[in-house]
């Protein structure tokens, strides 16, 4: 499932996460458009995207070919073997992620993220074949989610079937989102005397 679509749908199902996301965006932007410079100032929004990529990655299977005979755990892998692995399965493994099927953006707060085993999370692949555009893609996803969430409340529409459909990528069978304009947020009242 596309991470942007997945993030929008997951946020719509978790009102507390939606409220935190909108509050964070407004606290950083005060209603102005989100820019690239804001990305590092939106940690919760970044965590929502990361958690959406964990649960609903676009790429569900990768392949590699061994160039030499090697061992992976107890398994001997002969040279020139084709190997397939699934980020979708790995990123839902209960040995790596507590409450592995729950949408929990706070698992990416630095103290908690440190407990995630190395390579348990690899939505962009890893090694010398890792997607070279991963940082750009993450920034783009954060900007889009922040921009849309600040202006619109998305809710699943009638006829939605969010069941995962497998193709070259993962995507929902039929995900229809209804956009409701958000009420403009008021500028916070200043605590400065005389205001």
Image (spheres, rainbow, N blue to C red):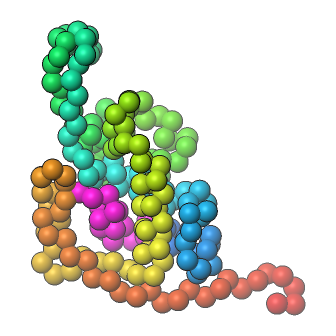
Q: Which quarter of the figure has residue 99?
A: top left
* Residue drawn at 37 percent across, 37 percent down: 130
Observer-nearest residue: 189 or 172? 172
Q: Is residue 89 visible?
A: no
* Residue drawn at 48 percent across, 77 percent down: 150
Asked if residue 117 lies left or right of residue 175, the reply is right
Observer-nearest residue: 17 or 50? 50
Q: Is residue 17 magenta?
A: yes
Q: From the viewer's perspective, is residue 76 above or below residue 131?
A: above
Measured as percent of width and height from the top left, residue 61 is found at 20, 40
Q: Is residue 82 magenta?
A: no
Observer-nearest residue: 96 or 47? 47
Majority secondary structure of magenta residues: helix
* Residue drawn at 31 percent across, 32 percent down: 95
Range of residues picked out in magenta: 1-18
Observer-nearest residue: 6 or 101? 6
Measured as percent of width and height from the top left, residue 43 is found at 55, 57
Measured as percent of width and height from the top left, residue 177 is found at 25, 77
Measured as percent of width and height from the top left, residue 170 is found at 19, 54
Asked if residue 189 lies left or right of residue 34, the reply is right
User: Which quarter of the figure is the N terminus placed in?
Assistant: bottom left
Q: In the displayed orientation, state which residue is furthest to the right.
A: 194
* Residue drawn at 23 percent across, 9 percent down: 69
Asked if residue 114 lies left or right of residue 167, the reply is right
State the count of labels.
0
Q: From the viewer's perspective, is residue 31 above or below residue 195?
A: above
Q: Is residue 102 visible?
A: yes
User: Which quarter of the figure is the C terminus placed in?
Assistant: bottom right
């Amino acid at each position: 499932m596309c991470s942007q679509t997945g993030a929008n749908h997951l946020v719509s199902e978790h009102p507390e996460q939606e409220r935190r996301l909108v509050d964070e965006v407004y606290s950083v932007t005060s209603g102005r458009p989100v820019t690239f410079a804001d990305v590092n100032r939106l940690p919760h929004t970044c965590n929502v995207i990361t958690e959406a990529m964990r649960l609903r990655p676009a790429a569900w299977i990768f392949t590699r070919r061994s160039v030499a005979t090697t061992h992976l755990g107890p398994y001997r892998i002969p040279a020139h073997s084709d190997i397939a692995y699934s980020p979708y399965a790995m990123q839902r493994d209960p040995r790596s992620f507590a409450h592995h099927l729950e949408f929990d953006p706070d698992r990416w707060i630095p103290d908690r993220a440190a407990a995630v085993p190395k390579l348990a999370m690899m939505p962009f692949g890893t090694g010398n074949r890792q997607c070279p555009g991963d940082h750009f893609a993450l920034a783009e996803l954060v900007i889009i989610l922040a921009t849309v969430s600040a202006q619109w409340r998305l809710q699943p529409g009638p006829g939605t079937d969010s069941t995962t459909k497998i193709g070259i990528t993962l995507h929902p069978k039929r995900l229809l989102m209804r956009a409701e304009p958000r009420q403009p947020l008021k500028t916070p009242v200043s605590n400065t005397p005389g205001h």
